[in-house]
Image (cartoon, helix red, strand yellow):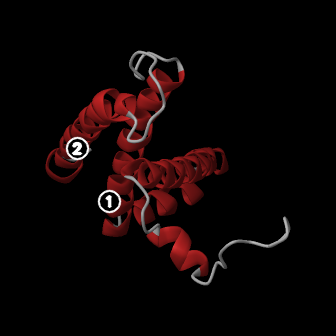
Amino acid sequence: MSNNEKMYDNRLGIIGWLGGGRWGIERYLYIIHRLAGVGVLIFFILHIFEGNLRIFGPEIWNPVMKVMEHPVFKVGELFIIIGFAFHALNGIRLILIELGWAVGKAEEPVYPYKSSLNTQRPLMVIMLLLAILLIAAGGFDLMFLGH
C-alpha cells in the first residue's frame, strides 16, 4: 500500500461522522459543544438584529414583538437556555483540562488512560449534572414563571 492510499474507505459519509461507532463520550461532547456554540452565535446575531429594529419606530417594533410572542419562540428560548448552559459549563471543563488543573498527575500513557478515567470523567459528570440543573431551572423559569 502506498502512502497516498487510505487504509479504509469512508463509505458511510456524513452518517459515519454522526454515528461515530467506537467514539467515546468526549467525542460526542465535542460535537454538541460545537453545535451549541454555533446556536448561541446565531442567537446573538438575531438578538442584535431584532433589538436594533427599535430605531425604525413603534410601527416596525410592535409587530415584530407580537410575532416574538408565538409559542415557537418559547421553544427557541428553551434551546437557547440548553445551549448556553451546556456550552458555558463544558467550556469551563475544557479550560480546566487545558490549564492542567483537571488532568491528574503525570503518568505513563498506557491505554486506558487513568488520568482520563479518574480525573476527567468525574469532572465531565459534574459538568453534565450542573448543566442539567441549570437547564431545569431556566426551563422552569421560562415555562412557569414567564417574563
Q: Residue at 42%, 47% (x, y): give it.
A: 26
Task: Using residue 121 as the reference point, say whether residue 50 is left or right of it.
Answer: right
Which type of secondary structure does the marked residue at label 1 adopt? helix
**In the image, what residue type sits under mark 1?**
Lys
Q: CA distance from mark 2 to mark 1?
A: 19 Å
Q: Nearer the viewer, residue 114 or 13?
A: 114
Choose the circle earlier in sequence order: 2 or 1. Answer: 1
Q: Name the residue beneath numbered marker 1.
A: 74
Q: Would you say 74 lies left or right of 12 here?
A: left
Q: Are marks 2 and 1 in contact (CB under 8 Å)?
A: no
**Residue 132 image label:** 2
Residue toward you, 143 or 38: 38
Q: Measuring from the top left, give residue 29's x and y in whole percent.
A: 42, 49
Q: Please identify the quadrant where the N terminus is shown.
A: bottom right
Q: Residue furthest front?
A: 1
Nearest-to-viewer mark from 2 and 1: 2
Q: Residue at x 53, y 47 (%)?
A: 37
- Residue 15 in the image, given as x and y percentages of width and height: 52, 78
Graded by Cα atoms within 10 Å as few (under 14), some (14 to 19) or many (20 or more), the crowding at tag 2 reads: some
Which of the image's four quarters has the C terminus?
top left
- Residue visible at 49% across and 49% down in the picture: 30
Q: Is residue 31 above or below residue 22?
A: above
* Snapshot quadrant of residue 136: top left
